[in-house]
């Protein structure tokens, strides 16, 4: 696809749902509804809130009920969307979410939104906070419908799903066959990008290092700096803990069950009956977050190296630095 | 239409009886007959009970599967949901999701001795195993039950356990009781009557009273988290292999199916969800998963 076709192609995407893309908002960037490709800042580094917001709402209603009759009715939102310009790390994060939310007990709310969404990836260049290369998430092999690699005056487009294939064939006028010179250009661009990564984290054996450093003083040191604000959870594309509350209406008989994103950095996350807390202080909570992120579960690391938690931590706690301390490198 | 796992099934409270100052016995029946029939569970699994307008909380099923599809629960009040449940009269409706979690490996335990160690409310899931093993007595060898209470007033399922004490070995199981308050009069009376089966002290003291055959015993422990360490140590001292010591854990839970993340424990090399990988774990797991006990 040529660079000039981008506008027209994006316009056509309307057929597949409301289009969301990275838009500059003040200092940072955010996925917002757009009508034209011009509105997007496609050379963005990272959005503050990751695309998980399309699938797991900050707050969402699960069902409404009538208390007296114990009757309830599920509430689901529909609506097709196209998320344009998603980066490889965020694609990997959604793959991880899929493993959690679409397992043998699939989450219907998540599943419906996921089925209603088209994901269009877009190539990126790392800044000083990106370490996806170390995490092995810098190149999306699958998990998208289409992926656009920006070359000099064109895009190399990869098709990642049947849905993507359908979009490509319905918009075939924008697409040209791949020439061997395109492949050469793509290869060079990717090779150059691989060399752009400056931040590295050795992840081999990290899981065991974390286990062995469970009693390390490093946790206390960083916990003393941490405000316990939970921003790191909010911006992390793989954090998905949620809490559930019932809200009762003014009539005191009807209401809704709602779930909302939760944070393991908050005290109540480990609280159980009788005031017992399994993670009573910030030390346990911070350590738990790093152990969770640095663990292998569902065959994937729980961190995709997007750098958000470092960038948005008000106390400047640097994710990679903490882990390098744990490894004894610093 | 795709099933929504978060929608509770309705169940009627057929019994809601006070057992102690803190705990009630609750018996539920799923309203829909087909749902009730399909509700097959492993012992040691739990359900999420919903009170619309108040919330949802996990509880162990404390009865074995029965023909009438009744679910027994033992609920300690104190929090929002638990207090609300106890205020509901017989005939009221609640929501039920589940059964969730893994449960105890009853098949694997066949042909072995069973040692059940319960502390306080931990007796709830163990009661279901006791029921089942007594009903299927031939499948298991010796069945020993240790129950630790604070005072007589806090003893749960009092009639059932008193009759086990009175019945002695005839009841099919060797039942031992320990109580923490050495001045508790009713417990002292029990001790006077059944001196070999009842003593004051913490539950791990009961090990003084009986021989454990380490090669062919499965130990199942359920109680406050501090108990796991002590009882685990006693058992290890007696050479019971850690993979044959089973424990059932409690953590904050919101979903019960590995979604909400609240129950995650462990370290980099051993992250686990208590709700879907547990709540039953082995002592070996506990020794290798940081923060489990
Ligand atoms: C697998 C599993 C099995 C379980 N089985 C059983 C069972 O068989 N029987 C049983 O009774 N319980 C059982 N529980 C525990 C039960 O789930 C909790 O008691 C219940 O979640 C409490 O919910 P709630 O809404 O009443 O408390 P909430 O109101 O939600 O309380 C929230 C938190 O606030 C704190 N809190 C509440 N009340 C007080 C208070 N009075 N003082 C100090 N802090 C307080 C507690 O830390 C509590 O966790 C089980 C838990 C698990 C995970
Ligand atoms: S964002 Fe930083 S200060 Fe806030 S909870 Fe996370 S680590 Fe602590
Ligand atoms: S832990 Fe930090 S770097 Fe890793 S995925 Fe989450 S926000 Fe990104
Ligand atoms: S209770 Fe929700 S993940 Fe375990």
Image (cartoon, coloured by chain):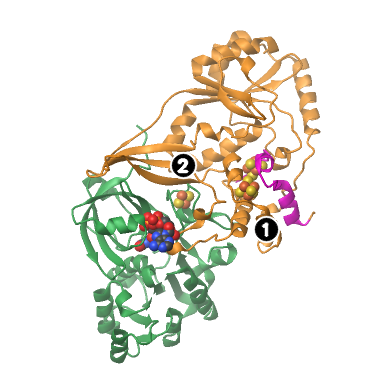
Chain colours: A orange, B green
Q: Which residue is drawn at 53% across and 78% down?
A: B239
Looking at the image, can residue A90 be seen?
Answer: yes
Which label was assigned to residue A219? 1
**In the foreground, B197 or B51:** B51
**In the foreground, B134 or B68:** B68
Q: How far apart are the two marked residues, 2 and 1, measured between alpha carbons?
A: 28 Å
Letter of the chain that mark 1 sits on in the rendering: A
Mark 1 surroundings: few (<14), some (14-19) or many (≥20) residues within 10 A: many
Is A46 on the left or on the right of A246, as rendered? right
Coordinates of residue A115 in the picture (x, y in percent): 47, 28
Quadrant in which the N terminus of chain B is drawn = top left
Mark 2 surroundings: few (<14), some (14-19) or many (≥20) residues within 10 A: some
**Residue A315: in magenta span:** yes
**Residue A94: in magenta span:** no
For mark 2, what is the residue?
Answer: A260
- Compared to B55, does A60 lie above or below? above
**In the foreground, B173 or A98:** A98
Q: Residue at x 62, y 24 (%)?
A: A23
Q: Earlier in the sequence, mark 2 or mark 1?
A: 1
- Compared to A81, does A301 lie above or below? below
Letter of the chain that mark 2 sits on in the rendering: A
Q: Which residue is drawn at 36% across and 50% down?
A: B56
Q: Which residue is drawn at 58% across and 16% down?
A: A168
Coordinates of residue B190 in the picture (x, y in percent): 29, 86
Coordinates of residue B255 in the picture (x, y in percent): 42, 48
Q: Residue furthest top?
A: A173
**What residue span does the magenta drawing correspond to?**
A300-328
Looking at the image, can residue B103 be seen?
Answer: no
């Amino acid at each position: 696809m040529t660079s000039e076709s981008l506008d027209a192609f994006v316009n056509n995407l309307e057929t597949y749902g409301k289009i969301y893309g990275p838009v500059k908002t003040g200092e940072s960037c955010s996925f917002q509804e757009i009508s034209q490709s011009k509105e997007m800042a496609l050379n963005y580094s990272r959005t503050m809130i990751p695309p998980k917001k399309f699938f797991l709402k900050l707050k969402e209603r699960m069902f409404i009920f009538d208390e007296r009759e114990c009757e309830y009715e599920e509430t689901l939102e529909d609506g097709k969307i196209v998320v344009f310009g998603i980066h490889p790390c965020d694609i990997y994060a959604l793959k991880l979410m899929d493993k959690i939310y679409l397992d043998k007990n699939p989450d219907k709310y998540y599943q419906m939104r996921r089925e209603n969404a088209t994901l269009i990836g877009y190539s990126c260049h790392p800044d000083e906070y990106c370490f996806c290369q170390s995490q092995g998430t810098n190149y999306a092999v699958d998990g998208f419908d289409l992926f656009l690699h920006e070359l000099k005056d064109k895009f190399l487009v990869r098709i990642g799903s049947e849905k993507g294939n359908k979009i490509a064939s319905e918009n075939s006028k924008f697409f040209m066959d791949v020439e061997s010179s395109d492949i050469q250009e793509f290869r060079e661009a990717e090779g150059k990008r691989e060399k752009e990564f400056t931040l590295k984290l050795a992840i081999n054996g990290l899981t065991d290092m974390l286990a062995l450093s469970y009693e390390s003083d490093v946790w206390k040191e960083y916990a003393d700096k941490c405000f316990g604000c939970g921003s790191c959870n909010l911006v992390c594309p793989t954090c998905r803990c949620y809490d559930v509350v019932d809200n009762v209406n003014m009539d005191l008989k009807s209401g809704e069950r709602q779930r909302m994103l939760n944070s393991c950095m908050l005290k109540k996350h480990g609280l159980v009956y009788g005031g017992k807390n399994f993670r009573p202080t910030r030390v346990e909570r911070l350590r738990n977050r790093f152990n969770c992120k640095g663990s292998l579960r569902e065959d994937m690391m729980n961190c995709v190296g997007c750098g958000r938690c470092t960038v948005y931590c008000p106390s400047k706690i640097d994710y990679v630095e903490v882990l390098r301390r744990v490894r004894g490198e610093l | 239409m795709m099933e929504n796992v978060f929608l509770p099934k309705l169940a009627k409270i057929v019994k809601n009886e006070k057992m102690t100052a803190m705990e009630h016995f609750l018996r539920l029946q799923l309203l829909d007959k087909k749902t009730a029939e399909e509700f097959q569970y492993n012992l040691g699994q739990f359900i999420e009970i919903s009170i619309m307008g108040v919330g949802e909380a996990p509880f162990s099923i404390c009865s074995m599967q029965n023909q009438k599809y009744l679910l027994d629960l033992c609920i300690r009040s104190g929090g929002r949901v638990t207090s609300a449940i106890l205020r509901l009269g017989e005939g009221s409706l609640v929501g039920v999701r589940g059964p969730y979690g893994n449960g105890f490996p009853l098949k694997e335990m066949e042909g072995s001795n069973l040692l059940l160690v319960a502390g306080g409310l931990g007796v709830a899931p163990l009661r279901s195993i006791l029921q089942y093993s007594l009903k299927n007595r031939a499948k298991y060898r010796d069945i020993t039950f240790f129950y630790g209470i604070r005072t007589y007033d806090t003893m749960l399922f009092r009639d059932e356990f008193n009759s086990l004490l009175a019945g002695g070995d005839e009841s099919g199981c060797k039942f031992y009781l320990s109580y923490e308050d050495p001045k508790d009069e009713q417990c002292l009376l029990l001790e006077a009557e059944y001196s070999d089966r009842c003593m004051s002290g913490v539950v791990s003291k009961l090990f003084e009273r009986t021989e454990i055959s380490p090669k062919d015993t499965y130990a199942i422990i359920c109680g406050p988290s501090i108990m796991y360490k002590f009882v685990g140590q006693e058992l290890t001292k007696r050479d019971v292999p850690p993979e044959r010591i089973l424990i059932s854990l409690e953590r904050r839970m919101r979903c019960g199916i590995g979604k909400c993340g609240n129950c995650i424990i462990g370290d980099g090399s051993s992250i686990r969800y208590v709700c879907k990988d547990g709540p039953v774990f082995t002592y070996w797991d506990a020794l290798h998963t940081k923060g489990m006990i």
